[in-house]
Amino acid sequence: MDSNTTSRRKFLLLSMGVPLGAALAACGGTAGPGSTSGSGGGAKATYWYLSVQPQEGVRTRAVERFNKANPGGTITGTPFQNDAYKTKIKTAIGAGQAPTIIWGWGGGTLRTYVQAGQVEDLTSWFDQNAAVKDRLFPSSFGAATIDGKIYAMPCETVQPIVLFYNKTAFEKIGAQPPTSWGDIMDLVPKFNKAGIAPFSLGGQSRWTNMMWLEFLLDRIGGTEVFQAVFDGKKDAWSHPAVLDMLTKVQDLVKAGGFIKGFSSITADSNADQALLYTGKAAMMLHGTWTYGGMSQDGGDFVPGGHLGYMNFPPVEGGKGDPSNTVGNPGQYLSISSKATPEQKEIAKKFFATGVLTDQEGKEWVETGGVPIVKGSDAAWAGSKDADFLNFVYGIASNAKVFAQSWDQALSPTAAEVLLDNIAKLFQLSITPQQWVDNMNAVIGQ
């Protein structure tokens, strides 16, 4: 599908469409801890991006390599934790003081930047640099395209949300991984009886809770239900599948499905991952980007073969295709329209020569990531993480639909209300119907 003509309204429904032999080579690019900059005396561009290792290290080194090769036009990077970044970048862009290079997730947030005239139209640049565009998974351009024009450079890795589990925890209770929603609910009392939390959850971060709703709504009602919300249809959240989804989530909370005190646990600290690899929790629904952290910090957990993973199971009687997935079809780099001509040229040179290197591709593979660049899956042949990388590649390439995370698909205004109401839902402080009413009020905003 030609990304130049793909409808903005339909990007959620794009299949991954990854060629069978396509896999990895590279992508990425952000700066590292503190700040990363060159020592040259020429023009300088600025770059804000997400922190947290090991991904931050890959971003750091990409900028360092670029700066070394381009002393006359370097990049200074500043890292932020996830939630802090979302606030900081929104404020800076609104004030016309954005960094030269803006890291993001595309989708609804990018659309607001475009409508405000804050980011560069890169369509003609991609036309002139066809080789850069042709290396990337075609599906990655859906969330970078607004009204038929490209406003961001897709980069880094494909990141579906998957269900991780601790094999040792399952062995302790003599159970198998869930194959349905009913299995999940049946496992909850068994793990609690054994003194193991069924699910780890960094609920203070809010977006981690959202993953449960995304999958449940897809499995219960199919992709059309959220598509109606995305399309701005009046009262789209009133679909019966939504109330079913919300009720199931609260049933899981009431049954003791999540670690005690989950609302005070943050994802940025990787505390939710630690609960899984230390055996205090049996399962965790999270993005594939957490694999690198668990490999790095979990001791023998990953190399010893104790980590299991699977796609989210179907819901009995649901209409959704169990091959569907949600998450990040890619990450995205935009150029501020307020940057100087010199800064814009540095950013474009970085896009062309610093964001798609073979070395960076190898480093993403080493973190357990699958870069969004076409290539051969031989890129991870012999890797200690080959099984996981093949699993992620299979999820991404076999999904009928790879939907973008809701808080990125919606506008920042609607996304904030969404996250606030999701937190209240998990805290049992609002009813499913109140949630529906609150969300219907911000459709299209």
Image (cartoon, rainbow, N blue to C red):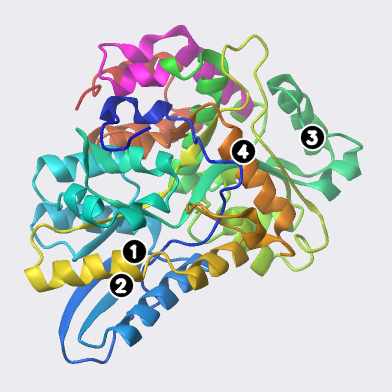
Please report contact status of discs 2 and 1: CB closer than 8 Å, yes or no: yes
Alpha-carbon distance for marks 2 and 1? 7 Å
Decide which of tag 4 and tag 2 comes sooner along the chain: 2
Locate the N terminus and report the quarter of the image it occupies.
Answer: top left
Q: Residue at x 50, y 20 (%)?
A: 246
Locate the C terminus and report the quarter of the image it occupies.
Answer: top left
The residue that mark 1 highlights is 49
Residue 78's label in the rendered image is: 2
282 relative to 349, above or below:
above
The residue that mark 3 highlights is 177
Q: Could you classify mark 1 by the number of other residues whose Cα lies within 10 Å: few (under 14), some (14-19), or many (20 or more)?
A: many
- Element at label 4: helix
The residue that mark 4 highlights is 395
Residue range corresponding to the magenta coloring: 225-252
Q: Residue at x 11, y 63 (%)?
A: 97
Q: Position of residue 192 (x, y in %)?
A: 77, 37
18 vs 74, left or right, is right
Decide which of tag 1 and tag 3 comes sooner along the chain: 1
- Element at label 3: loop
Q: Could you classify mark 2 by the number of other residues whose Cα lies within 10 Å: few (under 14), some (14-19), or many (20 or more)?
A: many
Please report contact status of discs 4 and 2: CB closer than 8 Å, yes or no: no
Of marks 3 and 4, the one in the foreground:
4
- Element at label 1: strand
Inspect the image, locate mark 2, and give the three-letter code of the amino acid beneath it: Thr
